[in-house]
Amino acid sequence: MPIFLGAALEYASLKAADPRLLNQVPEALERSVRWVHSSEVLDIAPLLSGGELLLSGGQALAGAGEERQAEYVRGLAGRGIAALALETGPALPEVPAVMLDEAQAAGLPLIELRRVVPFVAVMQEINSLLVSESVAQLQRGDQASHAMAAELAHGAGLDQLLAVLAEKALVGARLVSPSGLTLGAAGPLATDDAGDVTSVDVPVRGVLAARLELHVPDGGDPGMARVAGERCVDILGLALMQRMPPGLKELAGIELMRAINSGSQSWQLRQLGPAAGFAVNGAVAAVVIRSTGAGNLRAAVDELLNTRVAHSASYADNAELIALAAWPAGGKAGRTALLEALRSLEMPAGSAMAVGPLGMGIDEAPWSLAEARRTLDLPCSGDGVADSEAFAVELLAGPYLEPAVRESFVQRQLGAVVEHDRLRRSGLLATLTVWLDTGCNTAQAARELHLERQSLHHRLQRIFELCGGDPRGTGRLAALHLATRLARLQAP
């Protein structure tokens, strides 16, 4: 059985810290704790996978500003941790109100540890029990997998295989196609208001073929259900291949995406492209999504691509989902429409997406993919969907201009503006960047900066004084614009 948060707080090593739950989160004490971890690193969220009880002494948080404290809580909540436990004392006399408000809004249990305890002892006591439980779950998962393999060898169908899984894991099991069609089911299936449902993707040759739903009854073990489901994925994949083997076009599409991902030579892509339905000389653009839920996003991305582009293919690898969109000719308008459509796609917190530049021919697909990845690596790519063509200057300058050369150019062109921002905490550089990016359109820049036009005029006047005059109508305009773009490549 899993260790719930309420039970974890009662273990001797953690109870000695006199823990107190500070906020009202529904069923907080019934959350499953997958692991206990301690860290003072404020950027720890991307390294967590969900279900952790995170312990912190608060030293780093005590020296952080309110916005950084709130961002810390939002990041942890976005990763789905079980709870955050903060030790109060000399370094952090009390839990900051902004953190408590943010935790309440995000539904993250926030616990105050009112006495000092060795976090190592807490982790040793609780994690040793969790390891023992994980070993038992793996053993039961393997038993289910072996039993299903034996049934498959004797010709069992999907319903029979799911019945074995349901019996061994004590769950209801249903296999659903990406379109929502039930392919097989066994055991009691939960209603909307009863039990817990755990989903596991079932790929066939790298393509999402089905989703396994494991319906855990009240009092059941969701962790055990997930382990058993993950152990049985390969068996279900083999059964699906026997029932509906992939066609040659689908297999060619998988091999094409693997070839593009590995940067294969042009002649290989020109062979695989037509077999997968891609015109050799057609316009293509790559899409890259980095997310902990990349595999779960694939069905939604494929559905969007099917309605927006002439032809597409996708491939999921670890925490990255890549896709290729194709148009029969031109492609500029189609790529713009695809960008707008992708911006409406719902993605998990912490996800990042970029669309590569338009390539003329299938052999330029690896280049488009590489540019999309480089865009995501830029410190200025921001949130949402990044358009690599909007970062052409930064992508060009990165490999061809040494950092020292870039910094020197920015200093010569914008040194006075940067120094003004540093000393007075103003935002003149950001203002100038937006104004130049809008083509010196003061009205549009004011809207994007949420300023009154008169306020923007005052800012521009100060910028012009620092830069040596109004650059419009001079050769300095292009240099200033380039400098603002290069400044975005520098470390903050």
Image (cartoon, rainbow, N blue to C red):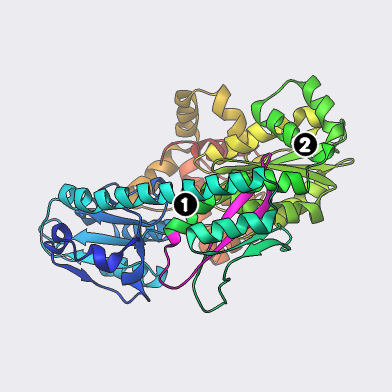
Residue 121 placement (x, y as % from top left): 15, 49
Q: Disc 1 vs disc 2: which is toward the camera? A: 1
Total marks drawn? 2
Q: Could you tell me which residue is drawn at 50 percent across and 23 percent down?
A: 402
- Name the quarter where the C terminus is drawn: top left
* Stretch of the chain drawn in magenta: 198-222
Q: Do the residues labelled 1 and 2 touch (CB within 8 Å)?
A: no
Quarter of image, res 290: top right
Left or right of 217 in this view: 441:
right
**Amino acid type assigned to the residue bearing label 1 in the image:** Val
Q: Is mark 2 on a helix, strand or loop?
A: helix
**Closer to us: 485 or 139:** 139
- Residue 203 in percent (x, y) is at 65, 46
Tell me which corner region of the image, top left, top right, bottom left or bottom right, holds residue 6.
Answer: bottom left
Residue type beneath disc 2? Leu
In magenta segment, residue 239:
no
The correct choice, above or below, for 27 with respect to 395 in the image is below
Residue bearing mark 2 = 251
The residue under the point 35% across, 68% down is: 103
Residue bearing mark 1 = 227
Name the element at disc 1: helix
